[in-house]
Image (cartoon, coloured by chain):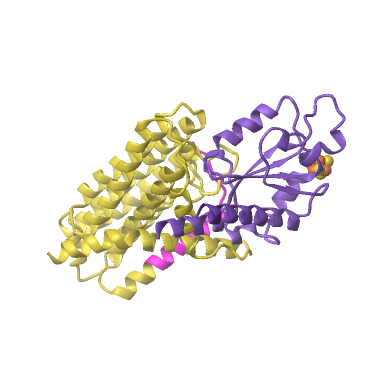
Chain colours: A yellow, B purple
Amino acid sequence: MGKLLLATVAVILAPIVGGLIAGLDRKITARLQSRYGPPILQPFYDVFKLLGKSPMTMNPWQILSVWVYLISSALTVFLFFMGSDLLLIFFVMTIGAVFFVMGALSTHSPYAQIGAQRELVTMLTYEPLIILVFVAIAMVTGSFKVSDAFGLSKPLLYQLPLMFIVLGYALTIKLRKSPFDISACHHAHQEIVRGVLTEYSGPQLAMIEIAHWYDVIFVLGLCALFWTTSFWGCVILLAVTYFAELLIDNVTARMNYKWMLKTVWGWGLALSVLNLLWLYAG
Amino acid sequence: MLKDWINKGRLKSPWIVHFDCGSCNGCDIEVLACLTPIYDVERFGIINIGDPKHADVLLVTGTVNHRNKHVLKNIYDQMPSPKAVIAMGACGLSGGVFREAYNVVGGVDKVIPVDVYVRGCPPKPEAIIDGVVLALEKVKALLEAAG
Ligand code: SF4
């Protein structure tokens, strides 16, 4: 019962916290570029404005896709706070991501098509890594349950330091940060307009934004698994990780997908294998 | 309550799509100057977005001619309402030094309704930011009239 309550509260609070994080993100990014930056509440203004715009959808598929994306993102957060199975959460997350791409593919715009293809490649890049991270967590805790990871007496980070870096790669891609923002950069202007987001507009775009906030919370939750023993340790770990993401976002330029596949798979797999071998031997 | 929030959002986050109807590039550089740390328009929530479907404000620079007026109209039609149009620079206002040319239509407002005119050749970045603020005031007046 307590878990159910916690999960429901998390689903309600996640968009608010996610939006605040997005606001902080933009503010800190602006400061790093020696600008003043928008107010912290800016993402909320954007989303409310988008909700009030007249709908312009190409076909009913888009609306369905956006709803499935939003619901599955909310469901990942719900399942996570229920202490559920990591693999189940992973499949729910993937369904959302696939529908997001399908909505873009269902239109005839070449920009959306290219964006959708690129999004598929990015999914191909980060999903094996996330699975490997889950396997490593399972090797330490003995089960795929989130609740078991929270019951540990020693932080996971001690045993899985390299896995945390691998998760960092996946995180950067999932959050659409440079150098991996090849499908839809948050400030892309002309290159492929906005890739996978091109054909989404108005209320649909607002819902995608909210779904993205859920994703951010979920991804940060995954990072939190690595330091579950103390509250402040966890908060500091998350803050440092997110700031590192921001820093990397600001000091790197966008790369192409081949480079991304090579680097992320190369380094990600190498680090994972090293860490898993170490676990196995130790 | 939700409506209040939406209206507030409309005033606080104007996303701009910038269309260049064959400008001499003077106006465009001034638009881009607004994004630099000196002027930093993002602190008002203004973002220069590439996609008309996400945009709230259409910023037009340069001379409209018989070839690109269709494109201009097309971009305008692709923007979901509520939307505003800002015409910029002498060329956008009337055709500027090119207004006598055989192919020039003369002014953005011959093709689409314009809400705000920003004078200059090219206008200063301050004037452009003023123009956006003025466009928002128009939107605000419309919202108040609509209740
Ligand atoms: S108004 Fe002046 S600066 Fe702007 S496009 Fe025309 S000639 Fe160039």
Q: Main secondary structure of the magenta part?
A: helix
Quarter-of-image position of residue A19:
bottom left
Q: Is residue A240 magenta?
A: yes
| Residue under the point 45% across and 54% down | A48
Q: Residue B107, position in %: x, y?
A: 76, 36
| Rendering quadrant holding ligand 1 | top right
Please state which of residues A69 and A227 is positioned toward the viewer in this rendering.
A69
- Residue A105 point in image, percent of width and height: 41, 30
Q: Quadrant of residue B36?
A: bottom right
Reply yes or no: does residue A250 show up in magenta.
Answer: yes
Identify the image quadrant of residue A7. bottom left
Residue at coordinates 37% horizontally, 39% vertically from top-left?
A: A100
User: Where residue B82 sits: x, y (%)?
Assistant: 54, 45
What span is in magenta? A238-258
In the picture, the quarter occupied by the N terminus of chain A is bottom left
Q: Residue furthest left?
A: A1
Residue at 47%, 49% (x, y): give it. A50
Q: Is residue B16 left or right of residue A101?
A: right
Residue B62 vertical placement versus A14 (above, below): above
Query: Camera-side residue: A119 or B123?
Result: B123
